[in-house]
Image (spheres, grey):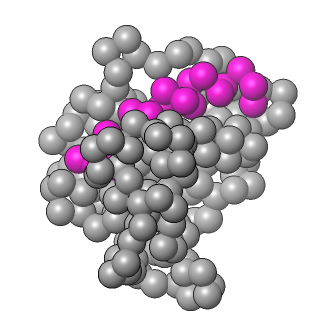
Amino acid sequence: MKLRQNAKHFAYRKALETPGIRSAATAGLVRLHTKVFAGKADPAHAEERKPHLDGLFDATMDSYLRALQEGYSEAEAREITHIQANFDFYNHGWTEMMEFPTDELEDHYDRYREFFERWDVTIDEPLGQFAPPEGLTEAPSTPEKLEDPEHPHAEGGFADDVYVETDEGDLVVGGQEAPADVDASQAVGSEDR
């Protein structure tokens, strides 16, 4: 998968790992991700998907932190969460929101199979053990889109590694190293504490 990575991503990580600002940072990141992906949704369905997306992205913050604790890089941990979200989009037939084509689902799963199997994450159950006990808010599916999927926001051909686009537009395989002077206050939501 191809992701963007800049100093803000490392600020988000630091904020999520810091007690006292973690919940505000999580709330801010959930709002941000819901806004971005609802913006990619079919406008006729965007609003009805928002509560589901809020729950989905809240749960993936836990998988992001767990992946970091297990030694995955920031880019890899973030990619894991994006893959989980794309599995959910696929399951709902929300192909217009996907970041990679449906024919790359298995390839993306296989790259993180060890992590996914440990936490019971599957394509059919994208959150595995990270799912909230009460489940996610239901949202209407569009399974007919799976028959002839359109992926206006997907970039294929990046299933063999994590690819990161820097602020300068360079493509870096594996991601970047964290800057030495990461400021958690630059994270979305940290100003809400």
Residue 53 magenta-highlighted: yes
Count of marks, rendered view: 0
For the point 75% across and 43% down, the residue is 39
Nearer the observer, 166 or 162: 166
Dominant SS in magenta: helix
Residue 78 drawn above or below residue 168: above
Residue 11 point in image, percent of width and height: 43, 63
Residue 96 visible in image: no
Residue 190 magenta-highlighted: no
Quadrant housing residue 184? bottom left
Residue bounds of the magenta highlight = 46-66
Q: Taking 32 as reference, is 24 left or right?
A: left
For the point 65% across and 27% down, the residue is 50
Residue 166 drawn above or below residue 136: below
Residue 3 point in image, percent of width and height: 52, 67
Q: Taking 129 as reference, is 106 left or right?
A: right
Residue 76 drawn above or below residue 141: below
Q: Taking 38 as reference, is 104 left or right?
A: left
Quadrant housing residue 162? bottom left
Among all residues in the image, which is located at the extreme top?
134
For the point 75% across and 30% down, the residue is 46
Residue 111 visible in image: yes
Residue 121 point in image, percent of width and height: 29, 37
For the point 55% across and 70% down, the residue is 4
Residue 154 point in image, percent of width and height: 64, 58
Nearer the observer, 7 or 153: 7
Q: Taking 91 as reference, is 139 left or right?
A: right
Among all residues in the image, which is located at the extreme right?
44
